[in-house]
Image (cartoon, rainbow, N blue to C red):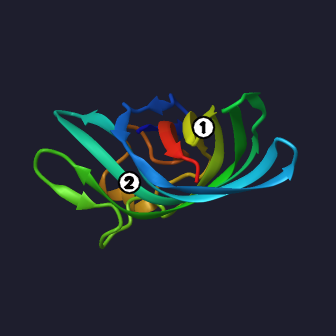
């Protein structure tokens, strides 16, 4: 389960933090041991991110779908016979593969005739959890570092919150909770 939102930064003026939007992520991770209890892990996820905001009278939902490639260093010490701690940290890169901007009157493709968001995203990811036998239970946070605003978005939709579009940047943020099976 994802709980994503975006943060709009401004060179001048207040930053805007949009309402969170639930979503999901599904994928797989593989790892290789480096030294005892330390491994390098990578994988591939399909993840749904986005945000909600009220524009004048309508609530607008932004849904952006990505294929995400994380690379994490994971510390996994034994805590018991079938119990291991998991603490991971590292970068991720992601490519936008679809999504919609929705309000009461219309649905617009985010990567249709006009690209409203940049397809490339990258950032840092942290995760933690427990491996219980073959099962993994964990949570994490993805901190997007790439400005995903496009000039087309600024021109057609306008800057949410008003003011000039100069110096405005939009960044993904995502908190996730997940379960998995260690094969």
Crowding near the residue tagged with mark 2, few <14, some 14–19, many ≥20 C-alpha atoms within 10 Å: many
Residue 127 appears in the rendering: yes
Left or right: 17 in relation to 127? left
Q: What is the secondary structure assignment of the residue under circle 2?
A: strand
Q: Tell how many labels.
A: 2
Crowding near the residue tagged with mark 1, few <14, some 14–19, many ≥20 C-alpha atoms within 10 Å: few
Residue 15 lies, in percent from the top left, at 51, 31
Image quarter (top left, top right, bottom left or bottom right) of the C terminus: bottom right
What residue do we see at 60% from left, 59% from top?
A: 43
What residue do we see at 63% from left, 37% from top?
A: 127
Numbered label attached to residue 59: none
Residue 131 lies, in percent from the top left, at 62, 36
What residue do we see at 52% from left, 39% from top?
A: 173
Q: Nearer the viewer, mark 2 or mark 1?
A: 1
Numbered label attached to residue 64: 2
Residue toward you, 69 or 149: 69
Q: What is the secondary structure assignment of the residue under circle 1?
A: loop
Residue 120 lies, in percent from the top left, at 54, 62
What residue do we see at 33% from left, 61% from top?
A: 110
Left or right: 127 in relation to 162? right
Q: CA distance from mark 2 to mark 1?
A: 34 Å
Q: Relative to 7, is 45 above or below?
A: below
Circles 2 and 1, Cβ within 8 Å, touching? The answer is: no
Which residue is tagged 1?
133
Left or right: 159 in relation to 15? left
Which quadrant holds residue 42?
bottom right
């Amino acid at each position: 389960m994802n709980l994503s939102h975006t943060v709009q930064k401004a060179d001048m003026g207040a930053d805007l933090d949009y309402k969170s939007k639930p979503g999901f992520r599904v994928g797989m991770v593989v790892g290789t041991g480096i030294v005892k209890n330390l491994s390098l892990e990578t994988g591939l996820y399909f993840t749904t991110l986005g945000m909600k905001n009220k524009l004048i009278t309508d609530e607008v939902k932004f849904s952006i779908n990505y294929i995400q490639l994380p690379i994490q260093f994971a510390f996994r010490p034994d805590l018991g016979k079938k119990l291991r701690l998991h603490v991971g940290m590292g970068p991720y890169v992601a490519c936008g593969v679809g999504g919609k901007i929705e309000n009461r009157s219309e649905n617009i493709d985010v990567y249709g005739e006009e690209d409203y968001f940049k397809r490339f995203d990258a950032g840092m990811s942290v995760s933690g959890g427990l491996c219980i036998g073959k099962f993994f239970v964990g949570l994490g946070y993805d901190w997007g570092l790439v400005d995903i605003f496009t000039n087309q978005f600024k021109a057609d939709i306008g800057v949410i919150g008003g003011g000039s579009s100069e110096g405005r940047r939009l960044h993904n943020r995502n908190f996730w909770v997940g379960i998995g099976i260690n094969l």
